[in-house]
Image (tube, rainbow, N blue to C red):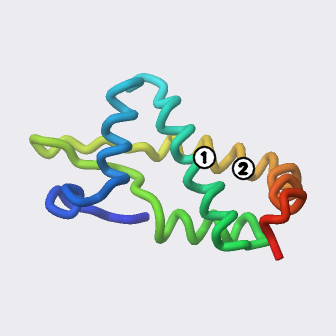
Amino acid sequence: MVDKNDDENFDNRQYFELKYLHEKEPVTDEFVKAYYLHLVLDHLKETRFNDLERAINEFLTEKVLIEIRIHGGMVISFKKALDEVISFLRRNEREILGDIHAKGDFE
């Protein structure tokens, strides 16, 4: 998990995107889920991993904000939304990797 404080968040594009998407739909965070899905699929394509778990683990530890701190110190956690996306990926691993392979995105 990428841990960012307010000063670092000022320059972090992901921070602003998550904040904006959460404000659009704060109850279900459907936009946040779509954003996370896009990010993790891009990561899978970029890394060319044939192992979904490896790609997910690297994504979770190096590439993604799981919570943000907004004005006044309030913390907004997106862990539930991210967990739902990761669960979806794991349930559909064969199809996802198959689609990426079929498009020639892997060597």
Q: Which residue lies under the disc numbered 1? A: 37
Residue at 19% across, 56% down: 10
What type is the residue that disc 2 sits on? Leu
Mark 2 or mark 1: which comes first in sequence? 1
Q: Is residue 17 left or right of residue 80?
A: left
| Quadrant holding the C terminus | bottom right
Could you give the CA–CA distance between mark 2 and mark 1, rounded to whole angstroms?
Answer: 8 Å
What type is the residue that disc 1 sits on? Leu
Residue 72, quarter of the rendered image: top left
Q: Secondary structure at mark 2?
A: helix
The correct choice, above or below, for 24 with respect to 103 in the image is above
Question: Tags 2 and 1 in contact by the CB under 8 Å rule?
Answer: yes
Q: Secondary structure at mark 1?
A: helix
Between residue 26 and residue 24, name the one nearer to us: 24
Q: Position of residue 31 (x, y in %)?
A: 49, 32
Q: Position of residue 60 (x, y in %)?
A: 52, 63
Residue at 31% across, 39% down: 19
The correct choice, above or below, for 8 with respect to 19 in the image is below
Q: Nearer the viewer, mark 2 or mark 1?
A: 1
